[in-house]
Image (cartoon, rainbow, N blue to C red):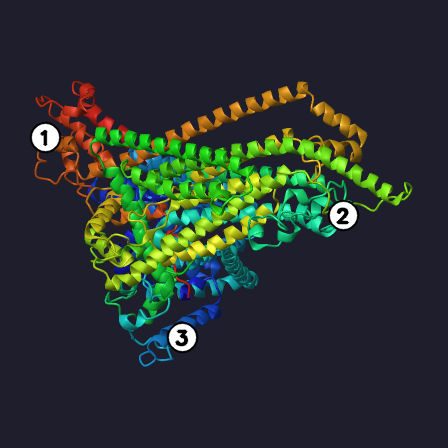
Amino acid sequence: MGNKQTTFTEEQLEAYQVALHGRYRELAPHLVPLDYTNNPDIRVPLSLIVTMPELKENPFRDRIVETFSEDGQGNMSFNDFVDMFSALCETSPRELKTIYAFKIYDYNRDNFICKEDLQKTLNKLTKGELTPEEVTLVCDKAIEEADLDADNKLSFADFENMISKAPDFLSNFHIRI
Amino acid sequence: MPRKSAAAEEVGIDIDEDVSDSDDGDNRRRANRRQGGGRGGGRGGAKGRGRGKKADSDEEEDDEDEAPKGRGRGGNRRRPANKRGAGKNNDDDSEDEAPKKKRGGAANRRKGGKAQESEEDSEAEKGKKGRKGGKKGGKEEDNGKGKKGDAKGKNKGKDKDDDKDKKKKKKKDDSSSDSNSNSDEEEESMSEGEMARLMEEVEEKKKLIANIRNKPWRMKRRLVLLKEAQQFVDKFEGALGKGKGRKWYAYKVMMTKKWIKFQRDFENFRTACIPWERKIKEVESHFGSSVASYFIFLRWMYGMNLVLFGLTFGLVVIPEVLMGLPYGSIPRKTVPRAEQPTAQDYSVLMDFNGYCKYSVLFYGYYNNQRTIGLLKFRLPLSYLLVGIGSFGYSLMLVIRTMAKNADVGGGDGEEGEFTFAWKMFTSWDYLIGNAETADNKYASITTSFKESIVDEQENQKDENIHLRRFLRVLANFMITCSLGGSGYLIYFVVKRSQEFANRTDLSWYEKNELELIMSLLGLVCPPLFETIAELEDYHPRIALKWQLGRIFALFLGNLYTFLFALFDEVNTKLDEEESIKNASIWAMKEYYANYSRLLNDSDSTPPPMDPGDVIRGPCWETAVGIEFVKLTVSDIQVTYLTILIGDFARAVIVRFLNYCWCWDLEAGFPSYGEFDISGNVLGLVFNQGMIWMGAFYAPGLVGINVLRLLSSMYYQCWAVMATNVPHERVFKASKSNNFYMGLLLLILFLSLLPVVYTIMTLPPSFDCGPFSGKAKMFDVIMETIDLDLPAFMGTLFSYAANPGLIIPAVLLMVLAIYYLNSVSEAYQNSNMELKKKMQMARDEEKNRRNNKDSTNQVMKDLEDLMPNRSLSPPAPPEPEKPPEPEAKPTKTKPGSAGKGVNLQKDVTLASPNPNARGPIDRPPGPRGPGPGPRGPGPGPGAGGGRGRGRGPPPR
């Protein structure tokens, strides 16, 4: 959340960073030092990050953490951590959220959301309660709806176009901390 | 250091930028970018532009000269000036002024980082430019700009540049006007301008600070940039004397945040105030929106009934209890002597006789005293007005809700576009942090997917239409038959019960035959209809509507036969009343006569007769009220028992006997029950009709109904969650509940009729109820007008009741309805038209994008025909080189093809083709009309011109 308050004074910014740092340190007290003045290069692994109450019920938690971590493996530095909450916070703009949402749903990181990505998303959303035929149907339909350039996968432009019209994307895609 | 990182990531940023900037100035910016790129290439490639370049550099030097001057003046303000330069570059880029673009690479890159400014930004900077121009002296600026424009115009001579020139000229005008306005300021002091510039700079920095979180950069980089900007602002804001506002600003921001939080909390509070919201959501997440729609309807009904309850109890029942005469004071408030021994028996009370019958619950209890109590409360008037008012309120509410729902239905016409994609990407609420909520959410997402899948499958279904039609006709025939049969059965039973009414030795069955038969029909027919409806194989949502309609017809038949029977009863009671009235008067006289004769004292007034002994009329109103209350109560009993036995007992048996049974009970025959939406909804609607009809004769009925709805909410919520399983095909409820509302409106209207009929035509009983002693019930209004309102009001009303006034009023209303109807039709048409257009636009967009990929066969063919092109990839958006040299002979301006929008290029690629190869023996195919006029036409030059002519519009 640190950067959300950038219109604030330096002290307030500090305060927020400290608060966030507290949360960060909470996850791995043995790893993260209290003193952060000289920016130590410390990364908290994915398995610890996803235990946060804000994330632990989210079906996409692993993907979120992976997306925001700099190494792509889910090991988060403090900056990544701040980054994550900055992007997911309530006031962060739609464009930014769209970018990160795209990255989150793009499981294989090929800059396209293809059918496999959709299937993974769907299975996480429904806890695998749909039959394979239903899954295929839904994925086909979703691509058919949103795919504007007929390449059978969703590019970022397709995704953005689709998301920009979604009524509850903004209200759903954020985390309060 | 930011520069370094910026340089490293420049490409990435550019992409992100392009993407993230999509909101407003998207198109424009994109076009600009392309232009810029094209020109950059052109500058490198084309030779004939040396002069232009020179001019550019001249101009640039001017600028550079400018800058140091500023620096010199500003003394220690070197840095801001520098920054300003960067900022200006930034501006230049977005305004697309090529000449200045090649200014310092570092600055440029720097700008790359910052470039993502909003539209207003560049506006602001325009303004800044203007001020700068002002300082320089408007004329000089004009000249320079004009020259520049000229040079460029001459050199490039492309329409694009014309375009740009125009833009520039506009800007120039701006600047000159600005300079004029600023000139006096500038004369005052030089540092004023400096100040302004600095202020702009600070503003810009602030904007950067404010926008930095919009940028998808890594935190490290953001922090660095942020720190730099903040330092700058800190340093110079104070110098400009703007620091004062900072605290205020921070305060304001904080307050905004607080306000937002407050709003959120308030919203939460409001949601928490909606009764049963969580219960319903829970049901919805497991059983789908169709089942939830029933509960929402139930809640709505509860709200409406609460208001009716408030009206009736507040204005009729409670005043009567508080201020009216107590029980036993007058005959109508006393149980007759003959009934007194059994009046407290349970069975009698359950039939709403005995003490129940002579209580505030029923019409007969109310006295016809014109005013009661100290407050002079006009109870009879209030009784009538509440009776009519509840109808008025219900009508208004139902119609308003329907209208609102219809509004919602019109609003989200676009919904069909991305059903699945939206569900997939936006349905998970990232705020969920509670395991139970998360489980519900999973369930609800799965359910909603299933709903959409059902819809989708229905769309894809196609089969033997004749068989389907035949089956549907057959089903309707069967259902009509059973409806007729049940109607006749009810009629028969009613007739029989009239015979029974004259007898006294009735068994329990004979007494309750009517209610039993009606409840039984209600129990048997709906499943029968449902079974028959299987034949029709409609989409579940449509099937539900049919089912609702049919059961409604069944209930309606029941209701109306019931009503006619009731009217028969009322008529016989009315006849009976005449004789009793005489008998009662005679008995009264006799009593007094006897009294005086026995005492032989004609002077003393006799004590009033014991109220229990007075001969009473049958009081048909109370009888009707009792009938309705009985029906309602038996309906409640049947409903609850059905749930208890049909659902709960079944579920228990299935669940626990499954351990020791020979087949799988859960998956096999009895299984668990499904929630019967149609039956429940209609039960509710029908019940409400009963309430409306009966409330006038039994004010207590509304209270009973409120209790029923309240208990039924909890009971059914529990029952559905505990004992039912979701429908096999979970389907989405229609967006508006208007079908339910429509049924409700119909039944409201139907129940309005008999009540109004009785109020207007039947004479009230002579010895019970608030209107006793009057010829008609509505006489109470006349009485009030005559006695309580000033005389002129009476004449006014008599005028208003004049047919000469009423007929024109009705005519006017009919005309108004006609007019509004036609207007709404027109709107509907235009709505449809717009929807169609939107759909078309969307299709077109899709097609266009498809064409880019050369999926369009015609384009492919045409491209194959081009010389030297067969090897190059079809219609590439990037490779601009191949077309250029090739197109040179035909086109005078090589750049234009490369710079066009992709689609445009496809067209230009295709269009010169027939020109370049004069004799073409291949038929042009579907593109027929295109080459036709072009083929024999003006030749290469024209082709180019055409290509160019096509260029500008998209920009």
Q: For this view, does A107 lie left or right of residue B32?
A: left
The residue tagged with tag 2: helix, strand or loop? Answer: loop
Q: Position of residue A77 (x, y in %)?
A: 31, 71
**Cα distance between the residues tagged 1 and 2:** 115 Å
For label 2, the crowd category at 10 Å Cα-Cα, with few meaning under 14, some 14 to 19 and many 20 or more, is some
The residue at which mark 3 appears reads as A22
Q: Is residue B926 visible?
A: yes
Same chain letter for marks 3 and 1: no
Q: Amino acid at mark 1?
A: Leu
Q: Position of residue B488 (x, y in %)?
A: 42, 32
Q: Label 1 marks which chain's residue?
A: B
Q: For this view, does B374 lie left or right of residue B856?
A: right
Of the image marks 1 and 2, the number of the one nearer the N terminus = 2
Q: Label 3 marks which chain's residue?
A: A
Q: Amino acid at mark 2?
A: Asp
For label 3, the crowd category at 10 Å Cα-Cα, with few meaning under 14, some 14 to 19 and many 20 or more, is some
Q: Amino acid at mark 3?
A: Gly
Mark number displayed over residue B865: 1
Same chain letter for marks 2 and 3: no
Q: Nearer the viewer, mark 3 or mark 1?
A: 3
Same chain letter for marks 1 and 2: yes
**Cα distance between the residues tagged 2 and 3:** 86 Å
- Of the 4 image quadrants, the one containing the N terminus of chain B is bottom left
Mark number displayed over residue B610: 2
